[in-house]
Image (cartoon, rainbow, N blue to C red):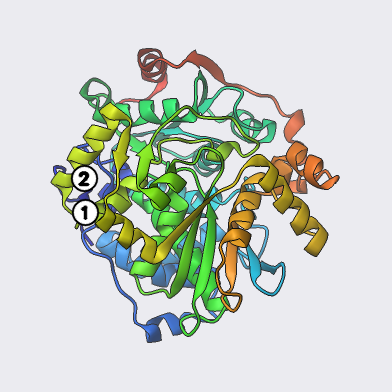
Amino acid sequence: MEYISTRGHAEPLDFENVTLAGLASDGGLFVPRSWPKFSAAEIADMAGLSYAEVAVRVMTPFVGDSLTETELRELCRQAYGRFAHAAVTPLKQLDHQHWLMELFHGPTLAFKDIALQLLGLMFEKFLSRRETHLTVVGATSGDTGSAAIDALAGRAKVDIFMLHPDGRISDVQRRQMTTVLSPNVHNIAIDGSFDDAQAMVKRMFSDPDFSGKFNVSAVNSINWARLMAQIVYYFVTALQLGAPKRKTAFSVPTGNFGDVFAGYVAAQMGLPIEKLIVATNVNDILHRALSAGDYSASNVTATPAPSMDIQVSSNFERLLFDLEGRDGAKTRARMQRFESDRAMALDGDMLAQVHGLFTSARVNNDDMRDAMRWAHEESGEIIDPHTAIGLQAARMSGIDATTPIVTLATAHPAKFPDAAERATGNRPPLPKRVGDLFERKEDYARLPSDYDAVTAYISERAAPRYG
């Protein structure tokens, strides 16, 4: 499998090098040169397999020669053996049509664990073949940071520097990062938004003064390997609900477009998906883009769903690349205009393609709380604010009642106890495996939202490219 950049200038790479690189050298995102396809019979043959075995089947075409099937299977067994539920991503039924896919049974209680536990093992495997030292830089709106840190803490040949917006994530989310005191873990709180942090991280990759000193890689969903691992649970869940003979709809609470783009890839691979519902909060750039073609960034509004408080969705570039016929020059020009103007428009042909698979909804805070109350009153389920946004979008979708709609439950409600208690009157406790979180010591730096200050801090602490 060969990978190309959405912006057309970077040299094609294999899976191992794409995983270690994270972002393409021309500022684009890596995608496979073509989407692998499964027949209906091949999808049907996955029914009844364990999560790890389905993962091997789905990911093998993307991995190519970088890992043998035996190596990939062992990495999957290690990654998913750490989850608290044997099914890894169990389904729960809410009523005759609505289901929850619980993605929060990993070590940090969020869906990011599903990909990052595997990515950490892949980093270690690939680095064991090289003399290279890796400097992982990332930005988090809440859950990526803790999942990446858990996956990489203590691993050889890797340092991780994670930026988060100071005061704009929950206490649980912050502490899951800042109480990990491994020497290779460095937490940075910046005085700005997630979009500010993400822009700095992307700039580091294209800055020769910085990237020339360090072997920089990414754990955000700009890293293809992470997004690849998220494709698996669409297959696992659809199979449980009757695929390939029966279509399933998925409602995805999203800010950075990575989780729902994984569903798009599953559909390109042959999985029968009725609709992908893109659920946003009031930071609704994706809803405006998909419904009316208006992809324009504005100021970020803080909400009870902080992981979705995003106005620039990095993975949307991957969809744009496909919508424009995989023409890297067109995508590069479009993204350069967006980076200067903070706005772009999708034309009628692009919207027509989008509406074949995607629909979208904007969910405000009141509707989010209504969904939390509904889930608790109707089925006894306490859900977190992000999941509630997905559930409310699913309930608003108008999809035929004979089609099951699966909402991706992206975080354990105990990560957002105040919001859950306000909506339901019940305060969800932390699971025992993280029950002492508020007794642990924190360690992190506070820095201004200034590129030079952040890169200077990293440069003083990161190991050189070879060492």
| Percent position of residue 399, x then y | 55, 69
Q: Quadrant of residue 1?
A: bottom left
Secondary structure found at label 2: helix
Residue 322 position, x and y percent, is 26, 56
**Residue located at (31% from left, 62% from top):** 353
* Tag 1: amino acid: Glu
What crowding class fits label 1: few (fewer than 14 Cα within 10 Å), some (14-19), or many (20 or more)?
A: some
Secondary structure at badge 1 equals loop
145 over 89 or under it: above or below: above
The amino acid marked with disc number 2 is Thr
Can residue 312 be seen in the rendering of this structure? yes
Q: Residues within 10 Å of mark 2 (few under 14, many from 20)?
A: many
Q: State left or right for residue 322 relative to residue 195.
A: left
Residue 28 position (above or below residue 198): below
Say which of 343 and 456 sits in front.
343
Q: Residue most toward the right?
A: 425
Q: Is residue 422 left or right of residue 396?
A: right
Q: Quadrant of residue 444?
A: top right
**Mark seen at residue 227:** none
- Comparing 80 with 387, the one in front is 387
Q: Residue at x 77, y 41 (%)?
A: 435
The reply to whether callout 2 and callout 1 are in contact (CB within 8 Å) is yes
Q: Which residue is mark 1?
A: 324
Residue under the point 59% across and 73% down: 404
- For the question of whether residue 128 can be seen, the reply is no
Which label sits on residue 331? 2
